[in-house]
Image (cartoon, helix red, strand yellow):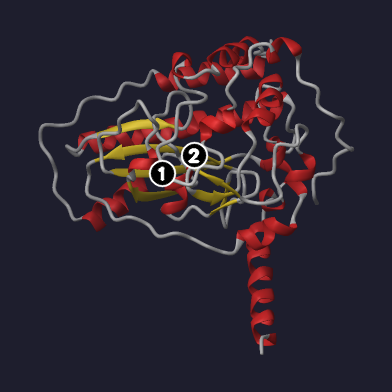
Amino acid sequence: MPVKRKTKPKFIPNPEQMALMPDVSGNEINGLGETKVRRSSPIYWQSPELTPFGPLMGWFYDQRPDDERMDKVQRDRARTMAIEIPPPSDVRQEKSAAEWTELVKEIGMENGASVIGIAKMQPEWVIETYDVPHPTVIMVGVAMDYDELKTAPDIQAAVEVIKQYDWGHRVTRALAIWIHEMGWDALSYGGSGNVPMLLIPPALECGFGELGKHGSIINREFGSTLRLAAVVTNMPLDTGIVDAFNVDDFCINCKACENACPPEALSPTKQLVRGVNKWYVNFDKCLPFFNENMGCAICLAVCPWSRPGVPQNLIRKMARKKEIMSHRMP
């Protein structure tokens, strides 16, 4: 059943937080309205000194609630981040790209990935001021528990988000350790905290799904519940292919996330961002609500694609509808 919510009250941001807002718009930093493709600029989750929104990041961390569930998941994440990745072996093993690709996916799934794919690194995916030294990116998707997610924006959902980001870090560290054992180079970027590259574009490129109106991946099996992580490597690997199942046709008519968003940060139409026409979340509207709730994820919780078992049914229905419409064409 769809998640039922009361009519959302008008969101009024905390004045203390708003006093820290920089003069520049986050949408401007993100390149909203720009016609040319370029690398993105640091804006959030990078080192605070790299972004005018650094003070807002500090304010966000100061809001951490006194909650044992949150404390536990933060301790778990700290342990994961402390996992040592030994340097690459001096003996480099040689296999074909196809063989390495099969093994990488096997290792990733064995360590808890829900989906895993591979893409060739593109310059525009690397955030300005950062460098990514390897030509291939291994993308990892970890699915959130829907029953936990649907409590958003309560603390229970925030804990689930951090828990799965932590799991993504575990998977990428396991992959990086294994790649090093094989004698190749790798860097684990996990999926949160100073990640030097965008994660959604390579996830789309390697076949994770399509971009939804809420600005996140919609996967044909896990819907809108994926959290992303990455490993970059020089190991020879075969890349995946884009997966398309007409999400745009659905999102254009569906207003679930758009109507449920308390700060009204979601647009009914796509917008041009750094030369790409895409679904875009208004940064300046989204951030204050996000900060005051230790995260949000309401848009993902109400998305019909997030409900277990629904994505496959929606894809079948859309395919049938498309077939019927094609037969009606003169």
At label 2, counting other C-alpha atoms closer than 10 Å, the crowd grade (few under 14, some 14-19, many 20 or more) is many
Give the amino acid at mark 2.
Answer: Leu
x, y percent for residue 185: 22, 35
* Residue 111 percent coordinates (x, y): 42, 39
User: Can you give x and y, in whole percent of width and height, for residue 113 in the image?
Assistant: 46, 43
In the picture, the quarter occupied by the C terminus is bottom right
Q: Residue at x 36, y 21 (%)?
A: 83
- Drawn side of residue 301 relative to residue 90, left or right: right
- Report the residue at 80% width, 22% height from top: 12
Q: Residue at x 42, y 53 (%)?
A: 205
Residue 304 versus residue 85 in the image, above or below: below
| Depth order, front residue of 236/114 | 236
- Residue 21 lies left or right of residue 16; in this view the side is left
Q: Which disc, if any, is residue 139?
A: 1
Q: Secondary structure at mark 1?
A: strand
Q: Secondary structure at mark 2?
A: strand
Residue at image coords 47%, 51%: 204
> Which of the 4 image quadrants contains residue 136?
top left
* Disc 2/disc 1 C-alpha distance (Å): 7 Å
| Residue ranking furthest to the left | 91
Q: Is residue 146 toward the left or the right of residue 218 in the image?
A: right
- Mark 1: few/some/many CA within 10 Å (<14, 14-19, 20+): many
User: Dots 2 and 1: beta carbons under 8 Å?
Assistant: yes
Q: Which mark is residue 228?
A: 2
